[in-house]
Amino acid sequence: MHSILHILNGDSTAHHFADTGLSGDVLVWREIFSQGPLTEDIQSAEFWRERGRWIEQTFGEQIAEYEKKVVDQLEKLNQPCDEINLWFEFDLHCQANLLGVLALLASKTNLSPPNIYLICPGKFPGKTNFRGMGELNSQELLYLFDTIRVELGEPDLFIAAQAWNLYVRNDTNALENWISKTHFWASLGLLKTALEAHIKRSRTNAAGLNSIEQLLLDIYNAGNTIRPKIYGQFWSMAPIFGMGDTEIDLYLQRLEDRGLVKF
């Protein structure tokens, strides 16, 4: 029997995925590797303990709940599987998670590794402001599966491993140098722009603000002083970051701590 696993980029995609009729088990990826501490050894217990502690401290979610929603789900990766479909998007949030998933899969030793496929839309027909698969219905998700799904090969896994190692080191100079020398991205063509966004947000301007903080401050100073309006403006102007409102709040808190905004 052909066993299939779908790894979805969050609960918003899972909502309609159940109605696609696609066979296989589902693992909903609920981590946010675009934020917080990371180490290269993603298969270690300490990696996940550190993530759990950070999630609890930052978002107030109990570690036990984190383990249930995130860590326990990873057990599905230990089950025999013939095919894995990765449903991730173009933005930094998803691309960082994708690198982590591929690093985790690469750490699994298996004499007969599964075929790995990627469904990664950067746009969708008829949707001018496409923000992600969470806004697609089951038929639209099926359309992506039928039209853009691509099998990942050794070049993809090699590029992903290099990118993950540089990303977790958070050495933006080394990452920038690697990007400039990488001219072939195999099936990971959307990774470059996401990593460039990461470099941009990792550096600060003369005022000591990174690109995300500066943009949020500009939005605020333009008269958008209510959080929902700030969220909407930010999503419209910087979709490459793929940040939800709770992540945006992390940056707004930094601005508030410096007395630059007030709610």
Image: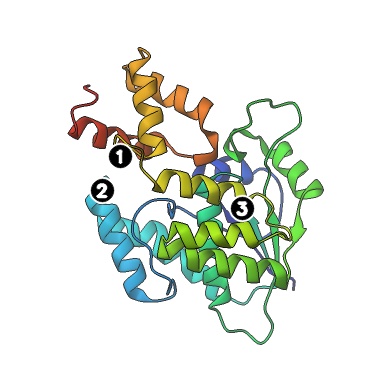
**Residue 21 position in % (x across, y down):** 71, 48
- Choose top left, top right, bottom left or bottom right for residue 133: top right
Tell me: 57 left or right of 193: left
> Which residue is nearer to you in this view: 207 or 111?
207
Q: Is residue 28 visible?
A: no
Q: Earlier in the sequence, mark 1 or mark 2?
A: 2
Kindly identify which residue carries mark 2. 58
Q: How many marks?
A: 3
Give the residue at x 40% y 48%.
Answer: 202
Could you say which disc has been placed on residue 62 in the image? Answer: none
Give the residue at x 57% y 38%.
Answer: 134
Q: Is residue 111 visible?
A: yes
Amino acid type, callout 2: Thr
Amino acid type, callout 1: Leu
Label 2 vs label 3: CA separation?
27 Å
**Which of the two discs, 1 and 2, sits closer to the camera?**
1
Label 3 neighbour load within 10 Å: few <14, some 14-19, many 20+: many
Element at badge 3? helix
252 vs 90: above or below: above
Badge 1 vs badge 3, beta-carbon distance below 8 Å: no
> Which residue is nearer to you in this view: 22 or 258?
258
Kindly identify which residue carries mark 3. 191
**Residue 168 position in % (x across, y down):** 43, 64
Could you say which disc has been placed on residue 250 in the image? Answer: 1
